[in-house]
Every structure is written in structure tokens, then in C-alpha cells.
Image: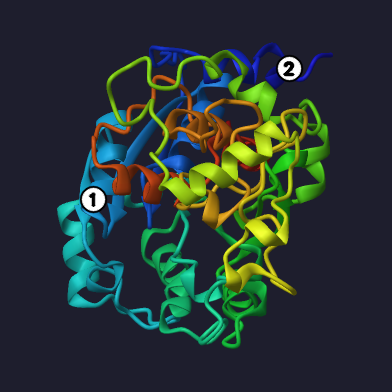
Amino acid sequence: MRHPLSYFRDDYWLRMKKKPRSFGKKTIRTVDLFAGCGGLSLGISEACRRMKFNHSIELALEWDQDALDILEFNLKPKNTICGDIVEHLDGKLGAKKLTKNEQALIKKYPNILNIDILSGGPPCQGYSNLNNHTRGDDDRNELYLRMVRAAEVLKPVSIIIENVQAVTRSKSKVVQRAIKHLKKLSYDVDSQVIEGVKNGVPQMRKRHFLLASKGHKVEFEMMSTIPREQNRTLKWAIEDLKNLNGKRKNKFSVSNKANSVNQERMNWLIENDEYELPNHLRPNCHKNGHTYPAVYGRMYWNKPSPTITSGFMCNGRGRFTHPFAYPARTLSPHEAARVQTFPDWFDFNTEKRTVITKTLGNAVPPILAMNVTFLLFQCLDT
């Protein structure tokens, strides 16, 4: 018997110009906290569609209005809150009595109780490898546990918490504390670092996921049953876009204009068919023992992309020089969105380049979220 997801092609979905409709008898109800621009919710929504479920986002909460605007424009949640989660879910873990703010939240949005899936990606900057001063010991790290408080208050059937892989090394042990507390709430819990490249994403991105479900066992080993191509490449994601840079007069379709020095560096790579910039062409701070050899590098056409960060439009912030475009250039936002597995119909709905790069770089790849969501469908009474 064929797996139900084997009837769908991710490459076809990525190139859809119109949002596909769902036709299901059952509706999966979700709440998305720390929602960003909607990568996690989009993955859940597409998992629902492929499994013949409808999807209703009962509430999306995000402190960044620009990111929330993008989510709202594309995914049409029933309710949105732009603000700090601590202002709405401020009770202590284990407190049986709800705070006034928590009572007000439920009173205003009664449909957020007893949802099927609670999802969220708490801020990860505190764990970032680029955050050398406070790595693992940052006040923002405690926001991870607001997801657990949300579970106490909203009583979801299942939970998805996404973060960077370094979250497990938090000095305050937020993951370990979350697991312990969720088990006290009678959830079965499993957590694991998932490699995007092994789960349908054409880039070398690793993310930590915690899954919890009431009444059913959660096992990441079940991901091996999901049909998918291994090691999708940059070519797989953007081959049809290679001649489109600048064809459309909007900032989503055009790569960034480099300064003269960086343009020379990128051109040198293409002209000499090289992938690493030699030391004599690097700035002084990147010569002789620099720790980021991929910076200023050229991308490989037949390999997965490096992790897409908010710096993907600058060759000085990673290996982001297009494999063969000449005059040389970095990726366009459209190309980066494809690598992040956002489909063409998903409209970032802004001409602000900083908003596009930040929201794209911080987003959960929807195809990765879709495959993780499939595990929870094994745990829902569907």
C-alpha cells in the first residue's frame, strides 16, 4: 500500500502560483505562538491538505508586526496578536490558577482551548553560534518554557516546539525542563535534532524539534516512513529561476547590488571556476586562520545549499554567490525562498528588503515542518 504522501510532489507544490485548496471533512485546529512569517504554520497546513484535512489557525501570536503581516496575508488566521507572549501567558509553570492576563486571553479567544496542535518557535538568538557573549545564558532562552505554560492553559492534544539545535545546550536546561513538565501533564514526549537535507529541504539546515501528544506515543523514528528524495540540491530548488534575476521589477526577484570590491570577489570565483576565495582577495580579518572559510564562497549547483540566513544577499556573510550567474551575484529573495521551501504563491507582500531577508532567514522551512507534522497525525484521533 502506497504511503498517502507519496501522491504529492514537493517540486510541483513549490512552483504553484496559486494557493491550493483543501477539501476535507475534518478540520485540524491550531495555535501558533512565536509564529514568525508562518513557516511552521504553512508546513502544518500543507500536511493537512495532503492528508485531506482542513486547517484552521485559531490564533497566531508574533511580536514582529512585519512578520505577522506576512503570515496574516497568506494564511488567514482567525485571530492574531502582535505582542509579547509574556503579556498574555504569564503564569508560573505548574500554577493551577490562571493569571488575570491568561483568563482575559481565553475569554477573548475561547476557540483556542483544546486545539489539535499548539506550535511555536521561540527566539533562538540566545543559542546562536554567532552570539558568543551570552550563548546558552540569555534571558530570551526562558521564553521556550512559555510554550509549556501555553500547554497548561490551552490544553492542546499535541505540541510542536521548534528551535536551533544548540537549544539542548542551554545553561538553564530549558528543553530538559520542558520535557519533564510536559510528562507531568500526561504528554508523551520525544525530541530530536532533524537534518533538513534528509527530510526534503535542499539546504544544510538542522533544527531541534520537541513533539508531545496526549494519549499516544510520539517517535521520531516514524519519519523514516515518509517518502522523500534524499539530498535535494540547489539546482532542484531554483533551476527554473536561473535566468529570471531582474526580469520583474520588484525587490523579491532581484539580488542585492554588491559594492565594487565584493563584486570583484564574486566575479573572480566565476571567471576562475573556483568555489573558495583565496586569502589574498579576502579582507584582512578573514586572512590566515579565519574561522568561516565558506564566507565569500560560491554555491554548488549539484549540492544542497548552505543554511539560508538573513545575510543571504551578501557574499561577505556566507557561501551565497550564485553558482554561475555572470556578472556574479548572490541569491535573490525568490531563490532563497525556494531553498527555504516557500512556494511561489506565498507572497512576502513587501518591498522592504530588510523585512524579506530577516523573515526568510528566521523561518522554519515549511517542508520540514510538514514532515514533522505528519508524525503528529499518527497521534491524533483522525
Q: Residue at x 44, y 28 (%)?
A: 334
Apparent side of residue 258 relative to residue 239 in the rendered image (left or right): left
Front position in the image: 301 or 381: 301
* The disc label shown at residue 6, or none: 2
Q: Residue at x 69, y 55 (%)?
A: 294
Q: Note whether residue 118 is visible.
A: no
Front position in the image: 213 or 169: 169
Instruction: Locate residue 164: give its quadrant.
Output: bottom right
Apparent side of residue 71 relative to residue 164 in the rendered image (left or right): left
Badge 1 density bin: few <14, some 14–19, many ≥20, Cα 10 Å: few
Check disc 2 and report its element: helix, strand or loop. helix
User: How was the colour assigned to the protein in this rendering?
Assistant: rainbow
Vertically, is 259 above or below 141?
Answer: above
Q: CA distance from mark 1 to mark 2?
A: 37 Å
Apparent side of residue 366 relative to residue 64 in the rendered image (left or right): right
Q: Residue at x 44, y 16 (%)?
A: 22
Amino acid type, label 2: Ser
Q: Position of residue 33 (x, y in %)?
A: 37, 56
Vertically, is 39 above or below 45?
Answer: below
Q: Position of residue 150 (x, y in %)?
A: 39, 65
Instruction: Locate residue 47: give its quadrant.
Output: top right
Vertically, is 15 above or below 350?
Answer: above
Check the picture and name the quadrant holding the C terminus: top right
Vertically, is 213 above or below 253?
Answer: below
**Residue position for label 1:** 110
Amino acid type, label 1: Pro
Badge 2 density bin: few <14, some 14–19, many ≥20, Cα 10 Å: few
